[in-house]
Amino acid sequence: MSRRRRGVLRLGLALALVAGAAVAVAVAASGGSNPRRAASVLATVTPSTPATTPTVARRSSGPAAPALVVSPAVRKLATGLSLDRQVAQLFLVGFRGTDTTAPFFTQLPARDWGGAMLTHDNYVNAGQLGTLAAEVTTVAKTAGHVAPLVAAPQVGGKASAFPDLPPAGEPA
């Protein structure tokens, strides 16, 4: 495959991911149940919206939908990243292993992932989990990457990834 074709494919993938993210934001902002409201929220998220001026879209009926506001610091950081790094920032990735010798940590410097997901497969105890989370951040920063979001599916009750950590009760 030619270099130019790979570049075009990367750009297409990046645009598709950004469009998908915009739709996800619009659906989330609309409450997820009203397609027309999601479309109106999406229409208010435009690149021409000043980053420093929060705006609210007004509709003839119903509550106002907030526009996407990006701080100048985040905008500056994002424009300084290559296209590959911008695309990688859209991903939240999981990994196998319960300690910092997992292959994920040797591969982490090669990608500027947006986040790392810790699940029950990574869990031994609370201290070990904290060590994994800290190592994700340390390795990424040492590689010159943006510190990734470290996330876990800890909703509470039987659905919790880590049974002996709060919240113990079922979600409301």
Image: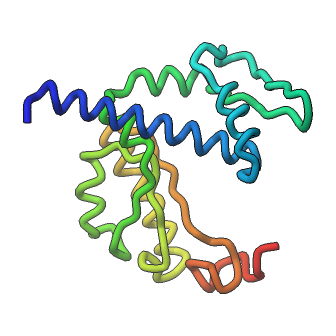
Which residue is at 46% across, 52% downward?
115
Residue 52: quadrant of the picture: top right
Rendering coords of residue 16 (x, y %): 41, 37
Residue at x 27% of width, y 34% of height: 10
Seen at 37% across and 76% down, the residue is: 98
> In this picture, is 53 found above or below 127?
above
- In this view, the residue farthest toward the left is 1
Residue 164 falls left or right of residue 34? left
Q: Which x, y percent locates residue 134? A: 46, 58
The residue depicted at 8 percent of the width and 36 percent of the height is 1
Quadrant of the rendered structure where residue 39 is? Answer: top right
Total labels drawn: 0
Quarter of the picture containing the C terminus is bottom right
Q: How is the image coloured?
A: rainbow
In the drawing, does residue 2 fall left or right of residue 109?
left
Residue 99 x %, y %: 35, 73
Residue 146 is situated, as x and y percent measured from the top left of the image, at 43, 39
User: In front: 107, or 46?
Assistant: 46
